[in-house]
Image: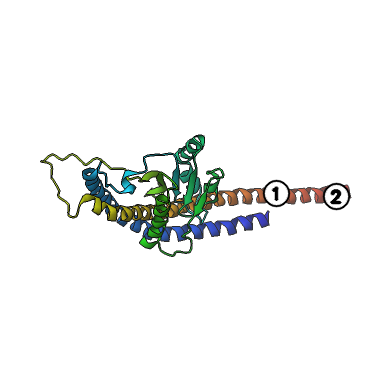
Amino acid sequence: MRVRIASTKATQKITKAMQMVAASKLRRAQNAAEAARPYAEKMDAVISNIASAAAGSPGAPALMAGTGNDKVHLLLVCTGERGLSGAFNSSIVRLGPRARALVDESGARKSNSSVSAARALSSCAATSRGRSSKTSSCASVRQLGFVNAEDIAKKVIARYEAGEFDVCTLFYSRFKSVIAQVPTAQQIIPLVVQAPAVSAGPATAYEYEPEEDEILAGLLPRNLAVQIFRALLENNASFYGAQMSAMDNATRHAGDMIRKQTLIYNRTRQAMITKELIEIISGAEAL
């Protein structure tokens, strides 16, 4: 029992240290995620405004117009790979259960589904059931930058232009708070054009120079990289929040286990002492 108590105390020290490390990293990751939100949202609003003007144009970029089919899906799944974060990864893969539904639906139509992990996860490839799977790891990156998202976006666009898929959906965990991370699914190819907000005043007419199609041809690839970058930052903050919560729970559970083990140890020790006293007294009376 002494060995077990010492082992549990050592584990508690590790989980406490991991909790403090996650808490220190969470602040920086949270600030980065919150700083990226306004830019990504504004980029969405601008592109939606331009795309609504170019909708139905024969020269519309392929990233907006799509291929006309939805048979082949690319699932771009952002996950954590450092572990000790509870059910963080499985909640993203399940997405209640949209990711699996997309894979199953594509399989039922005898189509191919690709699963690409922006941050590696072994079970992610398992959900593809033998279909093609590729991973891109950011484990060696000390601080996520736009160049990491841009590299992933270029690979996705290259596969789209090669005709490997029709629809790309981005899965990640949106950071809400330390104890709440929201699994999110976002279609990024083809672009989902949001309806412009209805204002109380007169509608504003915009004239674009050059033409909308030319502007979109340059903005859409960058928007794809921006959305992936935002997903990586949100996922990074969510990971540290989940890890901090998981390590806090593990530390408290280790404390409860230590108290139970100490109680068992003391009771066993007292029982052994009582037994020895009884044997001594019984032996003395027998003499």
Q: Position of residue 196 (x, y in %)?
A: 22, 42
SS at badge 1: helix
Residue 268's label in the rendered image is 1
- The secondary structure type at the circle numbered 2 is helix
Three-letter residue code for mark 2: Gly
Crowding around mark 2 (Cα neighbors within 10 Å: few <14, some 14 to 19, many 20+) is few
Identify the residue shown where x is 61% and y is 48%: 260
The colour scheme is: rainbow
| Residue corresponding to mark 2 | 283
Cα separation, mark 2 vs mark 1, equals 22 Å
How many marks are shown on the rendered structure?
2
Q: Nearer the viewer, mark 2 or mark 1?
A: 1
Q: Is residue 158 visible?
A: yes
Question: Which residue is at 49% across, 43% downward?
Answer: 113
Q: Determine crowd level at label 1: few under 14, some 14-19, many 20+ residues with C-alpha closer than 10 A.
A: few
| Residue type, mark 1 in image | Thr
Relative to residue 126, is residue 1 drawn left or right? Answer: right
140 or 268: nearer the viewer: 140
Q: Which mark is residue 41?
A: none
